[in-house]
Amino acid sequence: MISYLYLLLFTEIILLILTMLITSFDFVSPGFITIFMFILSTICVIWNEDYWNVRFTQQTYNIVTLGLAVIVAVELFIKNILSQQRKNVWIDQKEFARREGYRINIGTQATMALIFTIMMIIYVSAVVRAGGSSSLLNNIGVVHTDVEIDVGIVGSICIRVLRLGAFPFLFFFINNVVCCKKKILNNILLLVPVLDAMIAIFFSGVRSTFMYYIIAALFYIVMLQRFRYGWKEIKWRKYIKHIIIFGVLFIVFFVGSRSIVKNHDFTSTGMEYITFYLGSPLHLFNKIVNNTTLAFPTHYSNIPGAHTFKWFYQEIYKFGLIDTYVEDTQFVAVGGGYYGGGNVYTIFATPYHDFGLFGMLIYVALFYAVFNYIYYKKFKYNQKVSNSLESLMLFGSYYYFVFMSFYGTMTAQLKLQTILEMAVIIVIFRLLYTVKIKLR
């Protein structure tokens, strides 16, 4: 009897090798990242195959394989088109390589650091008041369930600005310290807003946001060094140390803080916890594939892509622009000896429910067409990379959309407010960027 779970792993490995050949071993390209994360997810399902009582079906195998194949095909198509516009070297690479770092006005740094620290204190105070408990950890857990209501308008604004503003500061800190080898002490004020954001996010209980910063940081490191030293000169071994450090810190924190926002009883070991988060979306998609209403109770035929763009429709419902409220995703039990559940089902589940198989493939193709076009047009095949720094910073702050495809449909988080969020990030970036670059 064919094990479609193991067959999926074999197919994913073949697709990963194909992607490596297509991209010339570009390990941060959208296709490589996605296939690699799906491989990790599949391995975690195999790890828990008996514990979760996994019965992986041919239908799930077919859908996931087709979706991943489309991702690879889209990258190949866009890369081949845009590569024809590329010369052998960036016309400003020598100039870019001479840059020593961004000498941001110390008064600007100090002012921004003070403002972010004040906002962090305001938000943490709001969490303490909103929780209504004598235990600070219990307060964090309470706020985690509904941050918008519990912390009030001012607290909500503070956490949003902190979360968004951390990306530009992280970008400049990485450029100066990691890429240009400048002293941390001379750039410490750039790190203060990032640390303020980290503290506030911890108190919000939304730990996944830490992963977004890790993804952005690694992306900034790789791309800035490629801009500085050349695309083909950057090898895997140069990033192993950074990946291990970021990975270990995240795992220790993520596992160690699970009892704050989740029921600790669902998992007994760190490995069980990590494999649940990595593997359960694929396993749960397999469980609902024949009846997606288990996760998405209603099919809104009058609202195209209702669950795929859920936050957008929920937002315009609040504005009275539509009269139908899109229900939240439902939890589905993992099964077997594990009595917990989840409500994320990979990137394929919501478009499959909303549009059917063919529509899902179109959605996946369009989603990856956007990310691949920006990646190759603005960065890999852009002859004047000095004009791409703002795009690089902004793109990196949303690159988790690609990284988390194994987890869920991240476009469900898009809404009208996303435009405002991007504007906030850009404004803070430009406030910091209006300085002269010191050359050797």
Image (tube, helix red, strand yellow):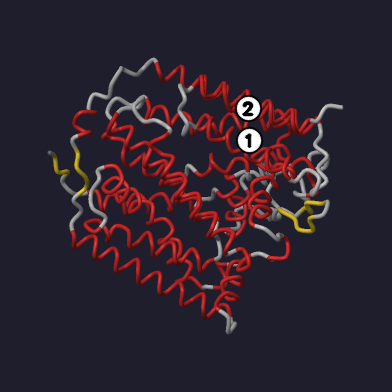
Quarter holding the N terminus is top right
Q: Position of residue 76 (x, y in %)?
A: 52, 20
Q: Position of residue 423 (x, y in %)?
A: 38, 50
Relative side of 93 to 294, left or right: left
Q: Position of residue 378 (x, y in %)?
A: 37, 31
List the residue tagged with mark 2. Answer: 13
Residue 13 falls in image quadrant:
top right
Query: Residue type at mark 2?
Result: Ile
* Local SS, label 2: helix
The answer to which of 12 and 127 lies nearer the viewer is 12
Quarter holding the C terminus is top left
Q: Which label belongs to residue 171?
A: none
The answer to the question of whether label 2 and label 1 lie on touching residues, with beta carbons closer than 8 A, is yes
The relative height of residue 377 versus residue 176 in the rendered view (above or below) is: above
Residue at the right extreme, as displayed? 1
Q: Which label belongs to residue 39?
A: 1
Seen at 19% across and 63% down, the residue is: 107
Label 2 vs label 1: CA separation?
7 Å
Q: Position of residue 142 (x, y in %)?
A: 61, 72
